Image: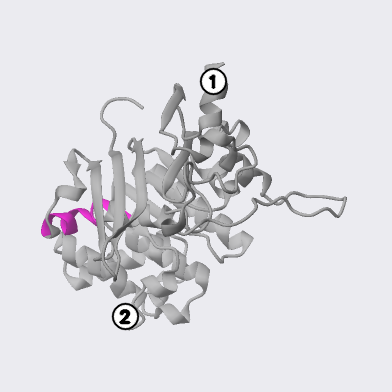
Amino acid sequence: MTGTPLLSVENLAVSMRLPAGGQMQILTDVGFALDAGETLGVVGESGSGKSLLSLAIMGLLPGAATATGRIMFEGRDLLALDDDTLCSVRGKRVGMIFQEPMTALNPAMTVGDQIAEGLVWHEGLSWKVARAQAVELLDQVRIADARRRAQTYPHEMSGGQRQRVGIAMALALKPALMIADEPTTALDVTVQAEVLDILDDLRREYGMALILVSHDLGVIARMCARTVVMYAGRRMEEGPTRDVLTLPLNPYSRGLLRAVPKRRTDGGKLDTIPGSVPGFARLPPGCCFSDRCPERIADCQEAEPAWAIPTAGRGVRCIRAMQEFAR
């Protein structure tokens, strides 16, 4: 990474106000940097805080949430912007593809008008011109008979088509940064491959940076140059995707890799990580992964390990990993 990055997340923490009073910490000490045109994968089990990280960058956290730290984008701290300024950035400079397009799309508007709306709002185009551009965008994301499809409603489209509409909406204003939150969830393998191809082609064409949130390590391996592994709201590991997937430093990363289904002929069981991701209010003492980690030692349950940079380009949160490097 050279020069000033397009996006720099520094010491990001998100807490949630509880109905009974008090605060519950959700994200803790999250940080990474992203250059223009670069791809970053964010992986982890459900409940690891991946989607909340995306919402924090977009400025779409729920009202009960409070974010601290810095999210520097194009030289401005997004957490310090007022609502009007943030709205001018969101959509125009930072786009997001949501996990479930059926709930992200407005069921009462045609898909063409939903794409055109951002162009009218941010670019000041007339509805006639914006609708024409919406058709071009639908064609660009490979929706057949785009002019007719622009007049349809979300419920009249398949899941793969709705996801392409979501991509077209996020792409309409040619943002510098695209965040894709589980964009291939619930899609069959063929449609998943097509959606990923579209994303990668558009990223290359427009020079966008891409943050791809996923629990699918195969998707991350295919699409992303760097990867952040998250668990219980913490970053557990970061590095070049090839290194993270072939030589993981954190036991949690190794557990995720072992759990990837493999072709087997012995009839054995799939490998799993025992237990489940704990609720943010019920984290174990010390390392947040200590209650599920097969490599834990006594020190792991004493204090939460700090984020460390054991070698250039790699980061890890693990006492055992740092002991290995110290030898």
The residue under label 1 is 325
Instruction: Examine the rendering and report whether any part of residue 263 can be seen.
Output: yes
- In the image, is residue 40 above or below residue 171? above
Residue furthest out toward the bottom? 108
Q: Is residue 317 left or right of residue 119?
A: right
Q: Secondary structure at mark 1?
A: helix
Residue projecting furthest to the right: 266
- For label 1, the crowd category at 10 Å Cα-Cα, with few meaning under 14, some 14 to 19 and many 20 or more, is few
Residue 269: image quadrant is bottom right
The image shows residue 315 at horizontal and vertical percentages of 45, 30
Circles 1 and 2: CB atoms closer than 8 Å: no
Q: Which residues are magenta?
A: 84-95
> Which part of the image, by quadrant, shows the C terminus?
top right
**Residue type of the residue flagged with mark 1:** Phe
Is any part of residue 174 visible from this angle?
no
Q: Residues within 10 Å of mark 2 (few under 14, many from 20)?
A: some
Q: Which structural element holds mark 2?
A: loop
Residue 37 at x, y percent in the picture? 37, 38
Q: Would you say 57 lies left or right of 140 here?
A: left
Q: Is the N terminus in the top left, top right, bottom left or bottom right quadrant?
A: top left
Query: In the picture shown, does residue 254 fall above or below 216?
Result: above
Residue drawn where x is 57% and y is 65% of the image: 187
Mark 2 highlights which residue? 109
Q: Position of residue 182 (x, y in %)?
A: 48, 58
Query: Which sits in the foreground, 296 or 223?
Result: 296
Three-letter code, disc 2? Met
Asked if the magenta segment contains residue 196, the reply would be no
Quadrant in the picture for residue 11: top left
